[in-house]
Image (tube, helix red, strand yellow):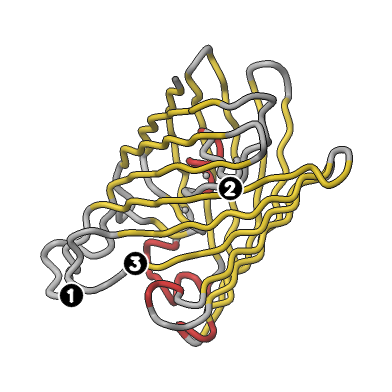
Amino acid sequence: MSKTFNRSAFHTALLGLPLVFSANAFAEFDVSVTLASDYRLYGVSQTLEEPTLQFTGVYIDESGFSAGTFLSNVDFVENTDPDDLDVSIEIDLFVGYEKEVATGHLLSATLIRYIYPGAEVDLDYNELIINYGFAYGALTVGYSNDAFAADETGIRYEYSYGFDINEEFSVGFMVGHYDLDDVFGDSYRYYDVGVTYAYEDFAFTLSYNDSSSAGEDLFGPAAEAAVVGAVSYSF
Protein backbone atom coordinates (compact mmCIF):
# COMPACT_ATOMS: atom_id res chain seq x y z
CA MET A 1 0.00 0.00 0.00
CA SER A 2 0.86 7.46 0.17
CA LYS A 3 0.30 13.92 2.89
CA THR A 4 -2.65 13.35 4.36
CA PHE A 5 -1.36 10.80 1.91
CA ASN A 6 2.40 10.27 1.30
CA ARG A 7 3.65 8.67 -1.88
CA SER A 8 7.26 9.75 -1.70
CA ALA A 9 9.65 7.51 -3.62
CA PHE A 10 11.00 6.18 -0.33
CA HIS A 11 7.62 5.11 0.99
CA THR A 12 6.50 3.83 -2.39
CA ALA A 13 9.40 1.39 -2.54
CA LEU A 14 9.40 0.62 1.17
CA LEU A 15 5.74 0.34 1.97
CA GLY A 16 3.96 0.14 -1.34
CA LEU A 17 1.16 2.27 0.01
CA PRO A 18 0.47 5.88 0.98
CA LEU A 19 1.27 7.29 4.34
CA VAL A 20 1.02 10.94 5.33
CA PHE A 21 2.09 14.23 3.70
CA SER A 22 2.99 17.23 5.87
CA ALA A 23 0.67 20.13 5.28
CA ASN A 24 2.07 22.64 2.82
CA ALA A 25 2.11 26.39 3.27
CA PHE A 26 0.07 26.72 0.06
CA ALA A 27 -2.22 24.63 -2.09
CA GLU A 28 -0.61 22.51 -4.77
CA PHE A 29 -1.06 19.42 -6.94
CA ASP A 30 1.74 16.86 -6.82
CA VAL A 31 2.22 14.11 -9.40
CA SER A 32 4.78 11.31 -9.39
CA VAL A 33 5.54 8.27 -11.54
CA THR A 34 7.47 5.33 -10.09
CA LEU A 35 9.09 2.30 -11.71
CA ALA A 36 10.04 -0.39 -9.18
CA SER A 37 11.25 -3.98 -9.25
CA ASP A 38 8.32 -5.04 -7.05
CA TYR A 39 5.17 -3.60 -5.47
CA ARG A 40 5.33 -4.39 -1.76
CA LEU A 41 2.28 -3.74 0.40
CA TYR A 42 2.75 -4.44 4.11
CA GLY A 43 5.54 -6.93 3.46
CA VAL A 44 3.71 -8.80 0.69
CA SER A 45 4.36 -8.57 -3.05
CA GLN A 46 1.34 -7.40 -5.04
CA THR A 47 2.95 -8.28 -8.38
CA LEU A 48 4.33 -11.80 -7.74
CA GLU A 49 7.75 -10.17 -7.31
CA GLU A 50 7.58 -8.68 -10.81
CA PRO A 51 8.18 -5.00 -11.80
CA THR A 52 5.55 -2.33 -11.29
CA LEU A 53 4.72 1.03 -12.84
CA GLN A 54 2.84 3.38 -10.51
CA PHE A 55 1.20 6.80 -10.71
CA THR A 56 0.23 9.09 -7.86
CA GLY A 57 -1.64 12.38 -8.07
CA VAL A 58 -2.54 14.32 -4.93
CA TYR A 59 -4.04 17.75 -4.29
CA ILE A 60 -2.95 19.32 -0.99
CA ASP A 61 -4.78 22.37 0.29
CA GLU A 62 -3.27 24.94 2.66
CA SER A 63 -6.01 24.08 5.16
CA GLY A 64 -4.62 20.53 5.53
CA PHE A 65 -7.17 18.83 3.25
CA SER A 66 -5.92 16.46 0.56
CA ALA A 67 -7.41 14.19 -2.09
CA GLY A 68 -5.98 12.08 -4.85
CA THR A 69 -5.44 8.76 -6.52
CA PHE A 70 -2.85 6.01 -6.81
CA LEU A 71 -2.64 3.53 -9.71
CA SER A 72 -0.50 0.42 -10.08
CA ASN A 73 -0.37 -2.87 -11.92
CA VAL A 74 -0.96 -5.91 -9.68
CA ASP A 75 -0.92 -9.69 -10.03
CA PHE A 76 -1.93 -11.93 -7.14
CA VAL A 77 -2.08 -15.37 -8.81
CA GLU A 78 -0.17 -16.92 -11.71
CA ASN A 79 -2.16 -16.67 -14.95
CA THR A 80 -1.95 -20.43 -15.41
CA ASP A 81 -3.49 -21.04 -11.97
CA PRO A 82 -7.20 -22.02 -12.13
CA ASP A 83 -7.75 -19.72 -9.13
CA ASP A 84 -6.53 -16.69 -11.10
CA LEU A 85 -8.79 -13.73 -10.19
CA ASP A 86 -8.05 -11.87 -13.43
CA VAL A 87 -6.80 -8.83 -11.50
CA SER A 88 -4.25 -6.57 -13.19
CA ILE A 89 -4.88 -3.02 -11.91
CA GLU A 90 -5.24 -1.38 -8.51
CA ILE A 91 -6.81 2.06 -8.25
CA ASP A 92 -6.85 3.83 -4.89
CA LEU A 93 -8.96 6.91 -4.19
CA PHE A 94 -8.36 8.85 -1.01
CA VAL A 95 -9.27 11.94 0.97
CA GLY A 96 -7.56 13.15 4.11
CA TYR A 97 -6.99 15.91 6.58
CA GLU A 98 -3.88 16.84 8.58
CA LYS A 99 -3.47 19.28 11.46
CA GLU A 100 -0.52 20.35 13.58
CA VAL A 101 -1.89 19.75 17.07
CA ALA A 102 1.28 21.08 18.76
CA THR A 103 4.67 22.29 17.58
CA GLY A 104 6.25 19.37 15.73
CA HIS A 105 3.23 17.10 16.29
CA LEU A 106 1.05 16.25 13.28
CA LEU A 107 -2.19 14.29 13.37
CA SER A 108 -3.84 13.11 10.18
CA ALA A 109 -6.72 10.94 9.05
CA THR A 110 -7.00 9.39 5.58
CA LEU A 111 -9.84 7.37 4.09
CA ILE A 112 -8.80 5.11 1.21
CA ARG A 113 -10.90 3.12 -1.22
CA TYR A 114 -8.98 0.20 -2.80
CA ILE A 115 -10.47 -0.70 -6.18
CA TYR A 116 -9.58 -3.68 -8.40
CA PRO A 117 -11.52 -3.25 -11.66
CA GLY A 118 -12.24 -6.32 -13.74
CA ALA A 119 -11.74 -8.81 -10.91
CA GLU A 120 -13.84 -11.97 -11.14
CA VAL A 121 -14.89 -11.44 -7.51
CA ASP A 122 -15.40 -8.26 -5.52
CA LEU A 123 -12.05 -7.29 -3.95
CA ASP A 124 -12.78 -3.60 -3.27
CA TYR A 125 -12.69 -2.31 0.29
CA ASN A 126 -12.13 0.80 2.43
CA GLU A 127 -9.50 1.59 5.06
CA LEU A 128 -9.23 4.43 7.56
CA ILE A 129 -5.65 5.42 8.42
CA ILE A 130 -4.78 7.53 11.48
CA ASN A 131 -1.20 8.85 11.62
CA TYR A 132 0.55 10.70 14.44
CA GLY A 133 3.92 12.21 13.52
CA PHE A 134 6.40 13.59 16.02
CA ALA A 135 10.14 14.20 16.41
CA TYR A 136 10.93 10.52 16.93
CA GLY A 137 8.99 9.06 14.04
CA ALA A 138 5.38 8.28 13.29
CA LEU A 139 2.73 5.96 14.70
CA THR A 140 0.08 4.68 12.31
CA VAL A 141 -3.11 2.67 12.74
CA GLY A 142 -5.04 1.36 9.75
CA TYR A 143 -8.56 0.02 10.31
CA SER A 144 -10.97 -1.74 7.97
CA ASN A 145 -14.21 -3.52 8.82
CA ASP A 146 -14.01 -5.23 5.42
CA ALA A 147 -10.30 -6.06 5.08
CA PHE A 148 -9.50 -7.74 1.76
CA ALA A 149 -13.25 -7.55 1.01
CA ALA A 150 -13.78 -10.43 3.47
CA ASP A 151 -16.44 -8.61 5.53
CA GLU A 152 -14.17 -9.01 8.56
CA THR A 153 -12.04 -6.58 10.59
CA GLY A 154 -8.34 -6.05 9.92
CA ILE A 155 -6.14 -3.63 11.90
CA ARG A 156 -2.55 -2.53 11.19
CA TYR A 157 -0.18 -0.99 13.71
CA GLU A 158 3.03 0.66 12.47
CA TYR A 159 5.99 2.65 13.67
CA SER A 160 8.28 4.38 11.17
CA TYR A 161 11.27 6.67 11.41
CA GLY A 162 13.45 8.37 8.81
CA PHE A 163 16.03 11.10 8.59
CA ASP A 164 18.22 12.94 6.09
CA ILE A 165 21.93 12.13 5.99
CA ASN A 166 22.56 15.16 3.78
CA GLU A 167 20.77 17.01 0.98
CA GLU A 168 20.87 13.95 -1.30
CA PHE A 169 20.61 10.87 0.93
CA SER A 170 17.96 9.81 3.42
CA VAL A 171 17.33 6.57 5.30
CA GLY A 172 14.35 5.13 7.10
CA PHE A 173 12.71 2.05 8.49
CA MET A 174 9.27 0.78 9.38
CA VAL A 175 7.94 -2.11 11.48
CA GLY A 176 4.32 -3.18 11.46
CA HIS A 177 1.89 -5.72 12.86
CA TYR A 178 -1.18 -6.74 10.87
CA ASP A 179 -3.99 -8.23 12.95
CA LEU A 180 -5.91 -10.46 10.54
CA ASP A 181 -7.27 -12.92 13.09
CA ASP A 182 -10.86 -12.23 12.02
CA VAL A 183 -9.99 -12.46 8.32
CA PHE A 184 -7.52 -15.35 8.07
CA GLY A 185 -7.30 -16.63 11.63
CA ASP A 186 -3.75 -15.32 12.08
CA SER A 187 -1.62 -12.15 12.28
CA TYR A 188 1.88 -11.30 11.10
CA ARG A 189 4.65 -8.72 11.34
CA TYR A 190 6.42 -6.93 8.49
CA TYR A 191 9.55 -4.80 8.20
CA ASP A 192 11.11 -2.34 5.77
CA VAL A 193 14.43 -0.49 5.78
CA GLY A 194 15.87 1.53 2.94
CA VAL A 195 17.93 4.38 1.59
CA THR A 196 16.94 7.05 -0.95
CA TYR A 197 19.12 9.23 -3.17
CA ALA A 198 17.43 12.39 -4.47
CA TYR A 199 18.63 14.15 -7.63
CA GLU A 200 16.61 17.11 -8.90
CA ASP A 201 13.10 15.71 -9.58
CA PHE A 202 14.23 12.06 -9.37
CA ALA A 203 14.50 9.76 -6.36
CA PHE A 204 16.32 6.42 -6.38
CA THR A 205 15.45 3.99 -3.60
CA LEU A 206 16.85 0.65 -2.45
CA SER A 207 15.00 -1.15 0.32
CA TYR A 208 14.91 -4.48 2.13
CA ASN A 209 11.47 -5.92 2.89
CA ASP A 210 10.51 -8.93 5.00
CA SER A 211 7.70 -10.44 7.05
CA SER A 212 7.42 -12.93 9.90
CA SER A 213 6.96 -16.65 9.31
CA ALA A 214 3.24 -16.16 9.91
CA GLY A 215 3.18 -13.81 6.92
CA GLU A 216 4.79 -16.47 4.75
CA ASP A 217 2.27 -19.02 6.01
CA LEU A 218 -0.57 -16.68 4.98
CA PHE A 219 0.75 -15.38 1.66
CA GLY A 220 3.44 -17.86 0.60
CA PRO A 221 6.52 -16.77 -1.41
CA ALA A 222 5.01 -13.30 -1.93
CA ALA A 223 5.82 -12.54 1.73
CA GLU A 224 9.43 -13.76 1.63
CA ALA A 225 12.33 -11.35 2.10
CA ALA A 226 13.17 -9.21 -0.93
CA VAL A 227 15.32 -6.28 -1.99
CA VAL A 228 13.36 -3.70 -3.98
CA GLY A 229 14.81 -1.02 -6.23
CA ALA A 230 12.78 1.94 -7.47
CA VAL A 231 13.14 5.20 -9.38
CA SER A 232 10.54 7.95 -9.04
CA TYR A 233 10.03 11.16 -10.97
CA SER A 234 7.95 13.99 -9.48
CA PHE A 235 6.51 16.96 -11.38
Disc number lying in front (3 or 2): 3
Q: Where's residue 53, x and y in %?
A: 31, 37
Indicate which disc residue 124 carries: 3
Circle 1 SS class: loop
Q: Are marks 2 and 1 in contact (CB under 8 Å)?
A: no
Marks 1 and 3 sit apart, C-alpha to C-alpha, by 18 Å
Say what amino acid the circle numbered 2 marks: Leu
Q: Amino acid at mark 3?
A: Asp
What number is the disc on residue 83?
1
- Residue 109: image location, x then y, percent: 64, 55
Closer to us: 150 or 50: 150
At x 54%, y 25%, the residue is 28
**Mark toward the start of the polypeptide (2 vs 1):** 2
Picture residue at 49% right of the left edge, 71% below the top = 215
Apparent side of residue 15 relative to residue 108 in the rendered image (left or right): left
* Badge 3 or badge 2: first in the primary sequence: 2
Query: Does 198 appear above or below 108?
Result: above
Q: Residue at x 79, y 42 (%)?
A: 100
The residues bearing labels 2 and 1 have C-alpha atoms spaced at a distance of: 31 Å
Give me the disc on residue 216. Answer: none
Residue furthest toward the front?
Answer: 63
Residue 38 visible? yes
Comparing labels 1 and 3, the label whose residue is closer to the camera: 3
Q: Can you give x and y, in whole percent of width and height, for residue 206 in the image?
A: 51, 35
Asked whether 22 or 207 is in front, the reply is 22
The disc labelled 1 sits on which kind of residue?
A: Asp
Which residue position holds label 2?
19
